[in-house]
Every structure is written in C-alpha cells, then in structure tokens.
Amino acid sequence: METQKIKTAVVILNWNGKSWLEKFLPNVIQHSNDAEVIIADNNSSDDSIKFLEENHPNIRIIQNDGNYGYAKGYNLALKQIDAQYFVLLNSDIEVTKDWISPIISLMDSDKTISTCQPKILDYNNKNRFEYAGASGGYIDKFGYPFCRGRIFDFLEEDKGQYNDATEVFWATGACLFVRASHFWEVGGLDSDFFAHQEEIDLCWRLKNKGYKIMVEPKSVVYHVGGGTLNVGSPFKTHLNFRNNLYMMFKNLPLSYLFIIIPIRLVLDGIAAITFLGDKKGISHLFAVMKAHFSFYFEIPKLIAKRRKIKQKYFLTGKTNYSILVKNKLKGIKNFSDL
C-alpha cells in the first residue's frame, strides 16, 4: 500500500540541540496541526535522540550518520520525506498560532512561488526584528544581504511598517517554506556551503529559473538567533565570507562577474582589517583570509556549477545601489529610507 504524500512537513535539523528541543519543540507541535513535524538529526552526541524517544515517541526521527551542517544535513533528510512543501525550521524558534496556513495559502495561490518566509522577530525582544531574515531579504550590487527591518547589524522595531506580503530576493533559512518540486529542480541546497547563506544561494538559483521568493508577515515567529553557531565565532565569519563569494561566482552573469568579484575581494580585505579592533580580531582576520583561499581553491568546481545555471542580472530584490554606501556613508539605518 502506497503512503499518502504529506502536504506540509516541518523539518527541524538538530545537532546537539537537546536544550532547544526541550524549550521549543512542544510549542511547534502544539501549533502545527496542519503539518507533520519531523526531526532530522546530524549525529548528535548529546541526549537529543533519547529525549525525543522518551518525551515525543510519535515524532518521526531521521538520523544522519554525521554532522553534515545545514545544507547537506537537510538534503539528506529531505530525500526521505515525500511532501508538497518543506518547512526548514531552526530549533531555536518559537512559532505562533496559525503560523503555517497564511504561507501555504499564498503558495497554493501562485505556483510560481518557490519559497516564502514569515515575519521573524527577536525572541528576546519581541517588538524588534531579528537578524536572520526580519521581514524578507534583499541583496545589493556587491552581494551584501540585508532585510526589510535589518540593515547590517541595525535592527528596526516592528511597528507594522513591513506587514505586506511581497516578493523579495531571499527568504531566511531559519524558517524557510519551500515547494519541494522546485527545491529538487535546482538540486536542493549546495552542500559545499555547510552552513550560512546557503538559503540565499538557493533562492538566487530559483530566481534565475524565473520563480518567486516571498515574505508573508501574517505569519510570525520568534527567533533566538545564534542558537547553533555563536554570533562571534570566527568559523561563522569564515563561512559567511566564503559562501558569499561562492554564491556570487555561481549566480552572477559573466559580464558582471569580473567587475563585482574583484571589488568584493577588496571590500572583504577592508572588513578584515576592521576586525582588528575586536576581542577576537586576529582570529576573524585569519577567518577572512582562509575564506578567500578556500574560494580560490574551489573556483574549478564553481565553474562547473555555473554551467548548470542560466544567470540573470535584473531580479526582484537585487538592488543597483551599494548598501555599504547607503548605510556607512549616508547613515541610512531603516529599510524604508532607502
């Protein structure tokens, strides 16, 4: 007898996150009656699995045989789930009543929508947008991501100013609704990213295919942030700088590639020097250097990936201005003032 396809699968990727599961999983289960909640475990060495088996015996657990990070960890797990929509949900998120239905309704209404995110607010300051996605993601001409409600490290207060559902450039990986058929059409997440900005790369590839990326603020969740990798981690710095170069090299049209990448390498160098004023400055400086060398080493593989993508330059949510100039030189902090 064939199993019936799930409409919506909420998949939480876990690695040594027992404390987050204890804190937030009951809330997710309570408010996800219209979906199946599944835990994908990246070979945790804490008591995550034991906790789940003892406290949530009805929850399906998919166990990966290693810590493959966000990208490959999810790819491996999602291959084992037959659903129309995947919801990739961080373990450090508190969801709210009816958080699923507004987004699924929107995606059902337009088959060209590939991914969508809710409004992401800060769990520790619930009137403020949260760094990872806020109310929808954008990207500037040099590949710097920013959001409605968040430019670099400045987070706006949520006053309902970004409550409209709209097309954006990227949707956050912290709570990513994705149409399964589109996800697999572009090959899923890029496993070489390990973690960080892989959702932007995914959205970029989907937009190059002509699909839409949306935000639906009728759905609201609260994100702790830094729950899986510390905000001040040099490893996180390495991943962010490296992966940003990866995705630009893959997705930019060739005519822009040889202009944007050299400029970005210089800007990265300036950023690396500014890290020296921080407590872990030297570690972050070396993290940026390592990111660049990793990028150079991977160029042959990135060229092969480029050949599978039909790059476009003019895409909704990609700006022709520099967010660095707008923010650092002109002092603009609010998205609505851009």
Image (spheres, rainbow, N blue to C red):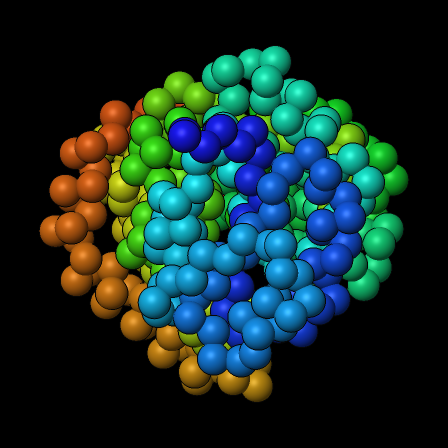
Tell me where residue 108 appears, x and y as whole percent.
59, 18
Q: Which image quadrant for residue 311?
A: top left
Where, quadrant-wise, is the N terminus in this rendering? Answer: top left
Looking at the image, residue 257 sits to the left or right of residue 128; the answer is left
Q: Which image quadrant for residue 286?
A: bottom left
Residue ID at (31%, 53%): 191
In the image, 202 versus 322, the foreground residue is 202
Q: Which image quadrant for residue 273?
A: bottom left
Tell me where residue 228 appears, x and y as whole percent.
56, 68
Q: Is residue 160 above or below residue 104?
A: below
Q: Is residue 119 above or below residue 157?
A: above
Tell me where residue 91 appears, x and y as whole percent.
62, 60
Would residue 230 be seen by someone viewing this image from the given angle? no
Report how many numbered discs are placed on residues in the image. Answer: 0
Residue ID at (29%, 56%): 192
Residue ID at (36%, 43%): 79
Looking at the image, residue 152 sits to the left or right of residue 94; the answer is left
In the image, 192 versus 302, the foreground residue is 192
Looking at the image, residue 154 sits to the left or right of residue 168; the answer is right
In the image, 175 versus 60, the foreground residue is 60
Tell me where residue 175 appears, x and y as whole percent.
60, 46
Residue ID at (32%, 72%): 289
Looking at the image, residue 169 sits to the left or right of residue 128; the answer is left
Would residue 299 be seen by someone viewing this image from the given angle? yes
Where, quadrant-wise, is the C terminus in this rendering? Answer: top right
